[in-house]
């Protein structure tokens, strides 16, 4: 569909991430299919509203997901079609439920890491030890790791922003071994006429030779090559998200942790444990790359030190109440 190609091209031209460009094209496609393949020029605000209402009925879609769909359709009309239907800008965004994040205790983190397979443990340690998002971790390049200063440089993260976060001392040795293994794999790929990696848009246009530069190789490369359609280059992508997601899901199950923990839970736990250790919120905000301090403040609501000072009134009843009757204390099935 040419319209989807136009959406992707315009999003990339405006320096949106490839992931955002694909997501916008996905929502435009769903919008067109929802209205029996009518062209968006034949549709208007009422049709956009009807599509968003249909998404709201899907209990599996969060408010942020539905808001992304609205942003994609606004982008379609404003930036691609350059015709904004009356009332489109007045459509309200979906409101989130204000749910608190799932946070692991330090012991639970240790138990899950102990159950991770060796090949997947290091990226999981970085999720927790650096507070990384899943895509940020898996798309790390060798040049982004500064073991001497114990820093990780995140390039073009969420919101197309760069930031720097801490690198745990405990992972430096295995991380150095991982980097050497990636470089050795790159040398073998070069011997086979491969060894290319995808480059960010502007870098790829200005300096295409960097696709073979060892510094631009992935820290966590995928197991297989793929051939890039336009250039014909034999490239290697980074580890796919689903590979680590599956491994974490299995490790959580095997560890006996009864929380609904995912890869992103390690980032929540990183922030919460820093707050518990007394790190000021501005520093935590910088490490996480949050635009608004209010986003970071949510971790003060789940930090242990706030609640540890509060005693439940139930625990004080023993001073006043008689002993319970234990005659009928069996647990019902």
Image (cartoon, grey):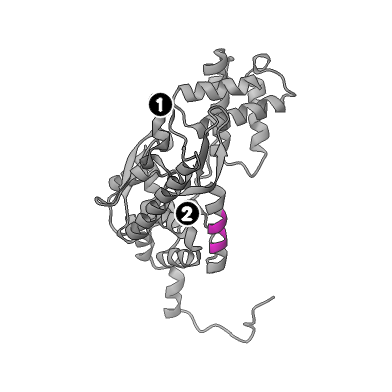
Instruction: Look at the numbered disc 1 and give the secondary structure of its residue.
Output: helix
Q: Nearer the viewer, residue 289 or 18?
A: 18
**Residue underneath mark 1:** 202
In the depicted structure, whether residue 219 falls above or below residue 66: below
- Considering every residue shown, the one lying at the far right of the view is 36
Q: How much space separates mark 2 and mark 1, taking CA atoms? A: 33 Å
Compared across the picture, whether 180 is left or right of 99 comes to left
**Residue underneath mark 2:** 265
In the depicted structure, whether residue 302 falls above or below residue 155: below
Reply yes or no: does residue 199 show up in magenta.
Answer: no
Disc with the residue nearer the chain's start (2 vs 1): 1
- Considering every residue shown, the one lying at the far left of the view is 149
Segment colored magenta: 246-251
In the depicted structure, whether residue 248 falls above or below residue 226: below
Does any portion of residue 90 appear in the rendered image?
no
Residue 212 at what x, y percent from top left? 41, 37
Residue 313 at what x, y percent from top left? 43, 69
Q: Quadrant of the N terminus?
A: top right
Name the residue at 62% across, 20% down: 3
Instruction: Look at the numbered disc 2 and give the secondary structure of its residue.
Output: helix
Reply yes or no: does residue 249 show up in magenta.
Answer: yes
Q: Nearer the viewer, residue 208 or 267?
A: 208
Q: Nearer the viewer, residue 43 or 235?
A: 235
**Label 2–label 1 contact, CB within 8 A:** no
Magenta portion: prevailing SS class: helix
Label 1: how many residues lie within 10 Å, few (<14), some (14-19) or many (20+)?
few
């Amino acid at each position: 569909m040419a319209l989807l190609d136009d959406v992707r091209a315009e999003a990339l031209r405006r320096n949106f991430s490839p992931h955002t460009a694909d997501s916008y094209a996905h929502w435009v496609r769903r919008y067109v299919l929802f209205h029996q393949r009518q062209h968006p020029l034949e549709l208007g605000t009422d049709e956009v509203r009807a599509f968003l209402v249909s998404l709201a009925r899907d209990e599996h879609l969060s408010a942020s997901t539905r808001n992304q769909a609205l942003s994609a359709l606004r982008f379609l009309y404003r930036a691609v079609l350059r015709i904004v239907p009356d009332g489109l800008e007045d459509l309200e965004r979906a409101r989130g439920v204000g749910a608190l994040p799932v946070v692991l205790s330090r012991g639970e983190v240790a138990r899950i890491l102990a159950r991770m397979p060796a090949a997947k443990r290091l990226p999981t340690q970085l999720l927790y030890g650096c507070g990384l998002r899943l895509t940020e971790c898996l798309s790390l390049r060798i040049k982004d790791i500064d073991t001497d200063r114990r820093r990780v440089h995140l390039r073009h993260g969420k919101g197309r922003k760069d930031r720097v976060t801490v690198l745990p001392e405990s992972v430096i040795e295995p991380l150095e071994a991982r980097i050497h293994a990636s470089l050795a794999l790159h040398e073998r790929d070069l011997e086979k006429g491969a060894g290319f990696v995808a480059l960010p848009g502007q870098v790829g246009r200005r300096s295409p030779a960097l696709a073979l530069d060892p510094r631009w190789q992935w820290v966590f490369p995928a197991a297989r090559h793929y051939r890039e359609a336009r250039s014909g280059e034999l490239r290697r992508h980074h580890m796919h998200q689903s590979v680590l997601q599956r491994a974490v899901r299995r490790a959580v199950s095997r560890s006996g942790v009864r929380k609904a923990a995912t890869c992103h839970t390690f980032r929540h736990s990183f922030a919460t444990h820093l707050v518990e250790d007394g790190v000021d919120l501005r520093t935590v905000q910088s490490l996480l790359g949050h635009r608004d301090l209010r986003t970071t403040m949510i971790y003060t609501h789940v930090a242990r030190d706030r609640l540890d000072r509060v005693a439940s009134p139930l625990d004080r009843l023993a001073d006043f109440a008689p002993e319970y009757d234990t005659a009928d204390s069996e647990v019902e099935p």
